[in-house]
Image (cartoon, helix red, strand yellow):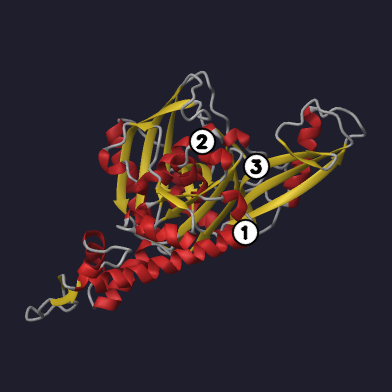
Amino acid sequence: MSLFGSSHFGLPRLKPLSSKRSHIVSVLDIGSTKVVCMIGRLTPREESQVLPNRTHNIEVIGIGHQRSRGIKTGVIADLDALEGVVRLAVDAAERMAGLTVDSLIVNVSAGRLGSDIYTATIDLGGQEVEANDLKKVLAAACQQSVRQERAVLHSLATGYSLDGERGIRDPLAMFGDALGVDMHVVTAERAALRNLELCINRAHLSVEGMVATPYASGLAALVDDEVELGCAAIDMGGGTTTISVFAEGKLVHTDAVSLGGHHVTTDLARGLSTRIEDAERLKVVHASALANSSEERELISIPPIGEDERDQPTQVPKALVSRIVKARIEETLELIRDRIQRSGFSPIVGKRVVLTGGASQLTGLPDVARRVLARNVRIGRPMGVSGLPTAAKGPAFSTAVGLMIYPQVADMETHAPSSGLLSSFGGNSSRIGRVGQWLKESF
């Protein structure tokens, strides 16, 4: 049985997990650097002080990851190439778990993620707030977010107000004349989501739900105090860097910039006249985001671009590599700092920033981030998950683990009543549609 119902906007929607029984959840993290499939067993857990919002323990029973192909800065550039990589990653995870996957929860980085707050108010006439009033005010806020060319990924009530008094968490059974709500809505371009779903359908799989990448990585990397008091998670991937801001236990803002670790690699390849794969190796082995005076004397050899056997590697000071890296990293962090400033959420973020994602592993990065962002910075690794192989315990796997956590918080979301505008999202994405498609193709 699917965890998801169908949505009014055509997007697949998660049904809440039953707190009484175990579930098998399969997720797919499609990034510019790698594609990761994880299969996990979620078993109900007792309430505890550690990660109190988690209703289930997560044990990863299958994992497969492949180097990405067909993706550029989070956008699908080649469907065939990406489909092949998805098949390989899912196949490896299935073999390890000893079971077959037919649908997955997928992350969304493309489609120019939008993050907006909508406010709605309804009249109570001095009566107490009933469940129906909550439904009404949430529906009114959701209705404002309906756009023809964009699909809603997440809609979260971030706070209620009664008679203009803000900051009310649960107004149920309270009295007042006017009930208001602030709704945080994350949207993406419909065409980008269609292409993502198409790619997964072509691999004979269906999409169970879609989760914005910044939301997923924040769920995996932040501890509860950070989520409660206000914090930003910055996920530095290969092609994109995403930002999520959490406060009072909820996602309140997301953003993304099209810069990531791969841009550092291409800068090195250009600046040192070497091949992309050699530049990637130089970055991992030698690069640092901090310039060091001792590096001026230390020479490293750069493999030449040409195929000619006579071409000798050139020797450059290690400091040159660090200077190239530092310039791009500072540019990315400055962009993020300005985005947080412009969003108006800077006071909520306060002094707390968590860096995660593969590119956050660069030597010296936390120190540069502390200086540029003028905030406390720590590296966030996925938490509260067992069964991860050592190689997958680092920040590069935060998004995949966050997708695994997401079903436990999916019931915090509210979705607008059917608008009738947008009935179908992907055309033949239903199971029955897929079987029909398969019969057509095969016979």
Instruction: Identify which amino acid the numbered label 3 is placed on.
Output: Leu
Quadrant of residue 64 in the image? top left
Residue depicted at x 80% and y 30%:
132
Instruction: Identify which amino acid the numbered label 1 is placed on.
Output: Ser
**Left or right: 379, with 339 as reference point:** left
Residue depicted at x 49% and y 25%:
49
Q: CA distance from mark 3 to mark 1?
A: 18 Å
**Left or right: 158, with 389 as reference point:** right
Q: Is the Cβ of the residue at disc 1 closer than 8 Å to that at disc 2?
A: no
Nearer the observer, disc 2 or disc 3?
2
Relative to 140, residue 329 above or below: below
Q: Which residue is identified by label 2? A: 224
Q: CA distance from mark 2 to mark 3?
A: 18 Å
Q: Secondary structure at mark 2?
A: helix
Q: Which residue is identified by label 3? A: 156
Label 2 crowd bin: few (<14), some (14–19), many (20+), radius 10 Å: some
Q: Is the Cβ of the residue at disc 2 closer than 8 Å to that at disc 3?
A: no
N-terminal of the pair, mark 1 or mark 2, is 2
**Left or right: 302, with 435 as reference point:** left
Residue depicted at x 21% and y 69%:
295
Residue 191 is situated, as x and y percent measured from the top left of the image, at: 56, 59
Q: Is residue 419 shown to the viewer in this render?
A: no
Q: Which residue is identified by label 1? A: 343
Label 3 crowd bin: few (<14), some (14–19), many (20+), radius 10 Å: many
Relative to 410, residue 265 above or below: below
- Say how many tags the image has: 3
